[in-house]
C-alpha cells in the first residue's frame, strides 16, 4: 500500500488541533506550552500557513543529556515543531505500522516493553519443552540513532510515499542544519568535533522513533522472509534469535552483519553474544528464563538508588508525597510482569517518609 494524497490531511486544522493535544500531554503547565495555549488558534493557523506554503523551517534544537540507562544526547525542539511532528506522525505512522512484522516492538501502539517480554518468555517456555539444547543470539547495533544514514532512509520513504509535498516536509526534517550523527568509535556524544551531517536522528524527536522503526523494518523483513527465522524478536535495536543449532546462529550473525553493513550502513557492537537459553536472556530491563522472569540486577539497583534519593528529597521538602507515590506505582507496574516478591520487600520495607521541618508529623509508609 502506497501513501498518497495525505498532505492536506496533515495540514488540516482538525489534525493540527489533535496534534497539539498529543504534544502537550504531561507538559501542559510548562511555560512554553501555556504560552502556545493562550494563543492556540493563532499558532495553529500560523503552522497551517507555513505547511501549506512550504515555508516551514525546523526550529532550533535544545541539547541536554540523560544518563539512564547510559549517557545519551537528547535534542528537543520548540513546542511548535513538536506539534508539527505529531501532525505528521498521527497520519502516516499507522500506515507504516501495518507493514511491520508481528514481533517488532517499541514505539508501536500495543507493542511495548511488557508485550515484548511476554512474547519472548512464551517462546522460551515453548522451546524448553522440545528435545535438544537451545541457544540465543543477541544482537545490538552500535550507536543506532546516531548512525542512521539519511540517503538510505529517504530512499526507503520514497518507495512507500508517493506524496511529493509530504516527502518535501520529511526531507526538511531529516536534512536539518543541525548535525546529529557520530563517527564510528566515538564514545561520548558530547564530542561536537566528531558530529557528522549525513547520518543520525535526534533522540527526542517523535519522527525519529518512526524513522527508526521504518529503517530496521528492512532488516526484519530480511530475517523473516529470506533467512526464514521463526523465533526472532526486536525491540528498537535490541534483537534476539533462538535456535537449537549454535552453528546456525553463527551463520545468521554473519549474514545479518553483512546485510547491515551493505544495505543499511550500520554495524553490530561488541555486545553480540551466542549462549544457551538456560543462562537466561537479558532483554529490555528484564532477565528471562523458561521458568521465570526477573528484573535485571542493574535495573533493581537503579530502583533502590532512586527511592533512597526520593526519600532524602522528601525529608528536605524538595518533592511531594505524590511524586514519591508516582515512582512507586511505576516500579510496581514494572514488577508486575516478573517474579519480584522478595525484591518488593527489599525495596519498600525501609521506605518510611518523614519531613525534616515537622518532627511531629506521623511517618507515612509506602506503598
Image (cartoon, rainbow, N blue to C red):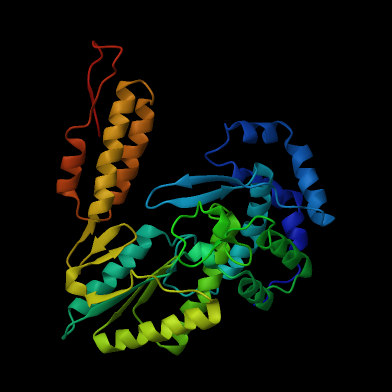
Quadrant, the C terminus: top left
Q: Farthest residue toward the right? A: 53
Q: Position of residue 260 (x, y in %)?
A: 48, 79
Whether residue 38 is visible here, answered yes or no, is yes
Q: How many marks?
A: 0
Residue for point 32% across, 32% down:
310
Task: Determine whether, in the image, residue 12 is placed left or right of residue 60.
Answer: right
* 122 in relation to 321, above or below: below
Whether residue 245 is visible here, answered yes or no, is no
Q: Quadrant of residue 268?
A: bottom left
Residue for point 17% across, 83% down:
133
Task: Determine whether, in the image, residue 286 is placed left or right of residue 261.
Answer: left
Nearest the eye: 132 or 187: 187
Residue for point 42% across, 82% down:
256
Task: Determine whether, in the image, residue 261 is placed left or right of residue 95.
Answer: left
Q: Position of residue 219 (x, y in %)?
A: 48, 78
Residue for point 24% across, 61% down:
287
Q: Quadrant of residue 245?
A: bottom left
* 17 in relation to 7, above or below: above
Nearest the eye: 203 or 48: 203
Nearest the eye: 174 or 130: 174
Q: Position of residue 347 (x, y in %)?
A: 20, 40
Q: Position of residue 223 (x, y in %)?
A: 43, 82
Quadrant, the N terminus: bottom right
Amino acid at each position: 500500500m502506497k501513501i498518497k494524497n495525505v498532505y492536506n490531511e496533515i495540514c488540516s486544522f482538525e489534525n493540527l488541533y489533535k496534534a497539539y493535544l498529543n504534544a502537550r500531554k504531561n507538559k501542559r503547565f510548562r511555560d512554553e506550552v501555556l504560552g502556545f495555549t493562550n494563543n492556540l488558534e493563532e499558532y495553529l493557523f500560523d503552522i497551517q500557513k507555513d505547511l501549506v506554503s512550504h515555508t516551514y523551517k525546523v526550529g532550533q534544537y535544545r541539547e541536554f543529556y540523560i544518563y539512564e540507562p547510559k549517557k545519551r544526547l537528547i535534542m528537543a525542539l520548540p513546542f511548535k515543531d513538536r506539534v508539527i511532528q505529531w501532525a505528521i506522525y498521527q497520519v502516516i505512522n499507522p500506515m507504516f505500522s501495518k507493514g511491520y512484522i508481528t514481533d517488532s516492538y517499541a514505539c508501536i501502539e500495543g507493542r511495548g516493553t511488557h508485550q515484548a517480554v511476554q512474547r519472548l518468555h512464551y517462546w522460551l517456555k515453548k522451546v524448553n519443552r522440545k528435545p535438544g539444547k537451545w541457544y540465543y543470539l543477541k544482537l545490538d547495533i552500535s550507536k543506532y540513532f546516531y548512525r542512521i544514514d539519511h540517503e538510505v532512509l529517504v530512499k526507503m520513504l520514497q518507495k512507500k510515499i508517493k506524496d511529493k509535498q509530504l516527502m518535501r516536509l520529511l526531507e526538511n526534517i531529516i536534512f536539518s542544519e543541525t548535525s546529529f550523527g557520530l563517527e564510528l568509535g566515538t564514545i561520548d556524544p558530547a564530542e561536537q568535533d566528531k558530529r557528522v551531517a549525513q547520518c543520525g536522528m535526534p533522540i527526542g524527536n517523535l519522527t525519529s522513533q518512526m524513522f527508526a522503526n521504518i529503517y530496521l523494518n528492512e532488516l526484519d523483513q530480511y530475517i523473516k522472509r529470506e533467512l526464514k527465522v521463526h523465533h526472532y524478536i526486536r525491540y528498537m535495536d535490541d534483537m534476539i534469535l533462538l535456535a537449537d543449532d549454535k552453528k546456525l546462529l553463527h551463520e545468521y550473525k554473519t549474514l545479518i552483519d553483512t546485510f547491515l553493513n551493505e544495505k543499511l550502513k550500520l554495524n553490530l557492537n561488541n555486545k553480540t553474544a551466542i549462549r544457551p537459553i538456560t543462562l537466561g536472556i537479558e532483554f529490555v530491563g528484564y532477565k528471562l528464563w523458561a521458568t521465570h522472569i526477573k528484573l535485571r540486577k542493574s535495573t533493581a539497583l537503579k530502583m533502590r538508588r532512586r527511592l533512597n534519593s526520593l526519600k532524602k528529597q522528601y525529608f528536605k521538602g524538595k518533592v511531594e508525597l505524590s511524586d514519591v507515590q508516582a515512582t512507586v506505582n511505576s516500579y510496581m507496574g514494572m514488577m508486575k510482569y516478573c517474579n519480584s516478591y522478595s525484591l518488593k520487600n527489599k525495596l519498600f520495607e525501609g521506605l518510611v517518609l518523614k519531613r525534616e521541618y515537622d518532627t511531629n508529623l506521623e511517618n507515612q509508609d509506602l506503598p
